[in-house]
Image (cartoon, rainbow, N blue to C red):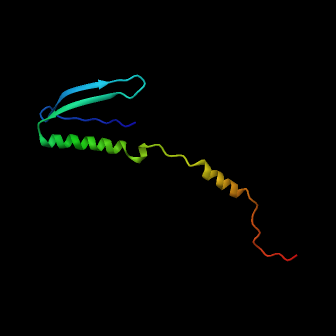
Amino acid sequence: MTYRSLYWDDNGARLKNFSGAAKSGAVSVVKIEIEVSHPFRFASLLQDLAEIRRDQDAPENKPASTPAPKRAAARRAIACQPPLLLTHRRD
């Protein structure tokens, strides 16, 4: 499990508003509004959010796909056949 956090000092930004919406049996949503007075703090917050999104979309976080069963069955069918006779036989 990975924990992610955003932080700032009170001089650069402040929490303006937040709200949440919860649905039974579904994903809940939290919305956060932050007022930023310094351009550097604004850019830093956006970079932090972009890094979180990039980490969440990384391939190691996605479940691996399972191989197709048809492909495995085809390999078994070939393996079950008798070996080919490649030598020349004179009777």
Instruction: Please state the horizontal and vertical placement of residue 16, each as a whole percent of the image.
Output: 17, 28
* Residue at screen point 57% across, 49% down: 68
Going by the picture, which residue comes out furthest to the right? 91
Between 13 and 18, the one lying in front of the other is 18
Vertical placement of residue 47 versus 8, above or below: below
Relative image position of residue 25 (x, y in whole percent): 43, 24
As drawn, 91 above or below 34: below
* The C terminus, quarter of image: bottom right
- For residue 35, what is the image quadrant? top left
Q: Position of residue 21 (x, y in %)?
A: 32, 24
Q: Residue furthest top?
A: 24
35 vs 11, nearest the viewer: 35
Q: Which is more toward the observer, 82 or 10?
A: 82
Q: Is residue 48 left or right of residue 79?
A: left
Left or right relative to 23: residue 5: left
Quadrant of the drawing holding the N terminus: top left
Measured from the top left, where is residue 54 in percent x and y?
Answer: 33, 45
Q: Residue at x 40, y 22 (%)?
A: 24
Residue found at x 17% / y 40%: 42
Image: 66 above or below 14 = below
